[in-house]
Image (cartoon, grey):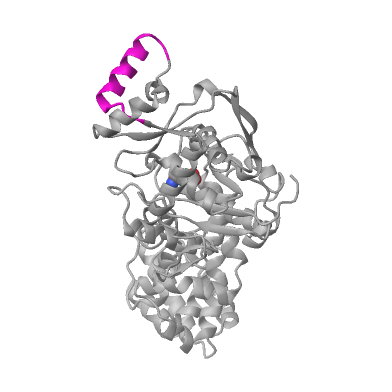
Amino acid sequence: MPEVSSVRVRFAPSPTGTLHLGGARTAIYNWAFARKHGGDFILRIDDTDPERSTPENVQQILDAMTWLGLDWDEGPSLDGSIAGDAGPYFQTQRSSTYQPALEKMIANNAAYRCFCSAGELSAKRDAARLAGGSSGYDRTCRFLSDDEVKTRIDADLPFVWRLKVPEVRTSVIVKDLVRGDIEFPIETIDDLVLMRSDGTPTYNFASTVDDATMGITHIIRGDDHLSNTPKQILIFEALASDDKGGAVPAFAHLSMIYGEDGKKLSKRHGAVGVEEFAEMGFLPDAMLNGLALLGWSLDAETTIITPEMLKAQFSLDRVSKNPARFDIAKLEHINSIYIQEMNTEKFVQAMLPWLEEAGLSSSADVAVRPEWYTELAPLISERIKLMTEVVPMTKFLFVDEIEIDEKARAKALDKDPEVTAAVLAATSSTIEGLDDFSLSSIEAAIKDLPSKLDLKPRVVFQAIRVAISGSLVSPPLFESVALLGKERALERLSSAI
Ligand code: GLU
């Protein structure tokens, strides 16, 4: 692709729902493309469906984008302010731009009034269907004489404005940056409605006028809009009679995201909303990484794509034409790598909200004993895939009394209660005798217990682990005992005995 100057792209969600994976990926590609080319990323809210659009959904979309680390140059901000000169950025507030645009199209002989009623239109459609013809509008009103139009206006007949699809050309070619040229024969393009009889614009008209007036250079969106594109190209051209070619933006249509069953990703596949993934314990950068890889890659090997890499190296050339398959296991794998790669301080800060929400810890506690958290952090980050695992894995370190997992109890404590009692009593007296409760001295003391008791190490260590943590899966044993502290460790052992 030749170097593009002053790129302007937009993400134009309809706030009829929250931000889903497909929309998030569209937003990410637009953002990365803008950043790569030093251009502008615009957020426009397509809120023309009054019944289904809500302020809560708008807020959620803004929050989810912010969580993912996507910043936009123009559009509504989280604090309610607006950035940019090409606004308003809510379609419902742009009604004053559609009328002048329509007038321009009328002046360019590219629009006409249609007086056909809903009843007439449906009768025409039924007849066309029976005859096996096209279901598009039959253009009756396109050929009304001036007098016939005047009579209808004088009779106060309601009318819509339709696009006059040019008769002189044979096709519209979408030069798609992902899929190459796609040709739509002109006879397959309907004289679509631009403006309804109540003066509201249709999606195709509003979107095109907005993209034209906002100076959008590239439209990157899902391929569910591909059939709209030839119509929009005709509108772009009609809006700019003086400078045709340059006025039409470039297009890139992104293939759908499929679930693991090969069907289009939907609620049936489980979580599809970005905020659900945040709640499941995915980190924003890992999510950005995983979503970016749904249809784009740097090369065949690279799995880890940081936001910086995406901004520097994203290109539409490497966007795939084939549907992407969403694989949650791969996303978890990516998440675990981001967790492991975090430095200790960052990981402590990442753990904190989860611990706080569970009522286990607070930033004040971190401030009081930062070293304790520094010791804990790597033991956890090496073992988890999702941040939600932090709480079950560390809870035993924070609470006064633990609940012992039933399976763990049966396996490690109740099999041979006499042996267990002996092991725990020996551990207790060993620990009690330690003046220095450092990791190395704990390790040295407990390590010798199996041979002293003439028992298998697994039997001994499993019993201690379950007695102090309540579970068979915990951070490493000696470290767990050290983090728990002498007093608490002794309490746990005696209550297990
Ligand atoms: N509001 C439209 C949607 O969410 C935007 C389509 C477009 O990008 O043109 O599907």
Q: Residue at x 56, y 35 (%)?
A: 323
Q: Position of residue 229 (x, y in %)?
A: 53, 36
Q: In this view, does 363 lie above or below 46?
A: below
Secondary structure mostly seen in magenta is helix
* Percent position of residue 220, x then y: 57, 45
**Would residue 6 appear left or right of 489 to someone viewing this image?**
right
Residue 392, picture quadrant: bottom left
Q: Quadrant of the N terminus?
A: top right
Q: What is the x, y in percent for residue 304?
A: 65, 55
Specify whether residue 291 is painted magenta: no
Occupied quadrant, residue 423: bottom left
Instruction: State the residue lying farthest toward the top.
Output: 131
238 lies left or right of 415 = right
Q: Is residue 219 visible?
A: yes
| Residue farthest to the front, as pictured | 147
In magenta segment, residue 116: yes
Residue 255 visible to an observer of this rendering: no
**Residue 112 or residue 488, whichever sits in front:** 112
The residue positioned farthest toward the bottom in the image shown? 435
Q: Is 77 rendered above or below residue 376?
A: above
Of residues 30 and 390, the one nearer the viewer is 30
Please state if 175 lies on the left or on the right of 205 as rendered: right
Residue 198: x percent and y percent? Answer: 29, 42
Q: Quadrant of the C terminus?
A: bottom left
Total count of labels: 0
Q: From which residue to which does the magenta span run? A: 114-133
